Image (spheres, rainbow, N blue to C red):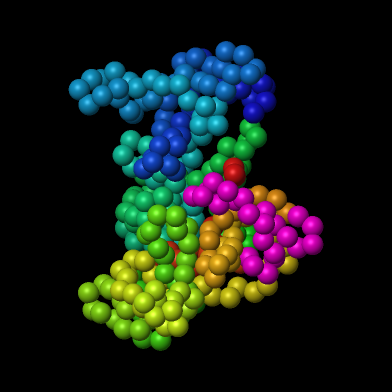
């Protein structure tokens, strides 16, 4: 961040928003003010005071703490929105802060269903509790302030498959259906395993058979397992061949017959890419043929998320 941007937007008393890297608070922004800006050009710390967070439950004294420059941004000017669209990225006012989410259903009567990727929750909000989601990038708001989403041209990272059902967040899988399974085991965060539904157990659980995992007791037999319905999703649709991936684009990378969610960190020669995996905090190299566009199954529709802004 340049010294001009720091002196202009983060001087003492400036109105700001503050993000947190703490578990359970990622994707949220809280209103605050600058108490003490960076002391010199090399300093990366700002002393801030929150407007809605208190020092403790028993006091009315506002919380102050020192945070990194990457955790602060100017407070965006208020904008009046009359309505939001399906799959539009928004910030929702919840628990004294703004939380990043995506509109998954238009409920009518000035209400929207918003899905939060960080917590895998879906909650309902009114228009006045939402705002268009923007990112602060190199001293500018993206998308620019005053630009309504209706005026934006369609982008590949905003496409969705409208042929998929949208009535319910849950999905019923019949025997023989090709699916993907998310693991809750440590070390497998962000991994999706290909499997087939064997039987609906009628208690929000399914008996499934993995395509590439074998039973430890019978190494020639594919592993079968009972899994919760919330761990399953349909197999992602084929959206066509992508000629080239771009830096910061989210992808699924095939490694050891498992699809892992990552982000392109570098485009290399000969159709090769470096992919960063946040959960494992490592970068690995992949051929173009071992990557696919990352899609998220949200409220019965496939949605392609936007690029990440920081790696």
Q: Which picture quadrant has residue 189?
A: bottom left
Is residue 175 placed above or below 191 in the rendered structure? below
For the C terminus, the quadrant is top right
Left/right of residue 233 with respect to residue 202 in the rendered view: right
Write down the region rendered in magenta: 268-291
Q: Is residue 109 left or right of residue 140?
A: left
Residue at screen point 73% across, 60% down:
272
Quadrant (top left, top right, bottom left, bottom right) of the N terminus: top right
For the residue pair 64 and 101, the one nearer the viewer reads as 64
Q: Is residue 107 above or below residue 83?
A: below
Q: 93 or 24: nearer the eye? A: 24
Which residue is located at x 70 percent, y 64 percent?
A: 287
**Residue shown at 44%/46% (left/top)?**
100
Q: Position of residue 180 (x, y in %)?
A: 45, 72
Query: Is residue 119 a member of the stretch shown in magenta?
Result: no
Picture quarter containing residue 173?
Answer: bottom left
Above or below, 309 against 16 in this view is: below
């Amino acid at each position: 961040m340049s010294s001009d941007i720091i002196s202009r937007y983060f001087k003492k008393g400036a109105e700001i928003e503050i993000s947190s890297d703490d578990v359970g608070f990622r994707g949220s922004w809280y209103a605050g003010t600058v108490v003490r800006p960076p002391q010199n050009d090399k300093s990366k710390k700002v002393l801030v005071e929150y407007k809605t967070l208190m020092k403790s439950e028993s006091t009315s004294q506002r919380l102050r703490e020192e945070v990194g420059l990457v955790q602060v941004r100017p407070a965006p000017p208020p904008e009046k929105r009359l309505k939001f669209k399906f799959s539009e990225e928004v910030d929702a006012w919840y628990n004294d802060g703004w939380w990043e989410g995506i509109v998954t259903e238009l409920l009518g009567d000035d209400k929207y269903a918003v899905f939060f990727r960080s917590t895998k929750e879906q909650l309902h909000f009114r228009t006045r509790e939402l705002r268009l989601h923007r990112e602060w990038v190199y001293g500018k708001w993206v998308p620019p302030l005053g630009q309504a989403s209706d005026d934006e041209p369609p982008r590949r990272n905003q496409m969705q498959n409208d042929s998929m059902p949208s009535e319910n967040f849950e999905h019923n899988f019949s025997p023989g259906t090709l699916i993907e399974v998310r693991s809750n085991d440590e070390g497998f965060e962000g991994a999706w395993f290909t499997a087939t539904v064997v039987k609906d157990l009628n208690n929000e659980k399914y008996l499934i058979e993995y395509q590439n995992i074998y039973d430890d007791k019978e190494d020639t037999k594919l592993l079968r397992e009972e899994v919760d319905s919330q761990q399953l999703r349909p197999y992602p649709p084929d959206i066509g061949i992508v000629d080239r991936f771009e830096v910061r684009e989210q992808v699924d990378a095939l490694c050891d017959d498992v699809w892992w969610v990552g982000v392109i960190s570098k485009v290399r020669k000969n159709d090769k890419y470096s992919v960063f995996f946040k959960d494992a905090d490592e970068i690995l190299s992949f051929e173009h043929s071992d990557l696919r566009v990352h899609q998220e199954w949200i409220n019965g529709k496939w949605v392609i998320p936007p690029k990440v802004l920081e790696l």
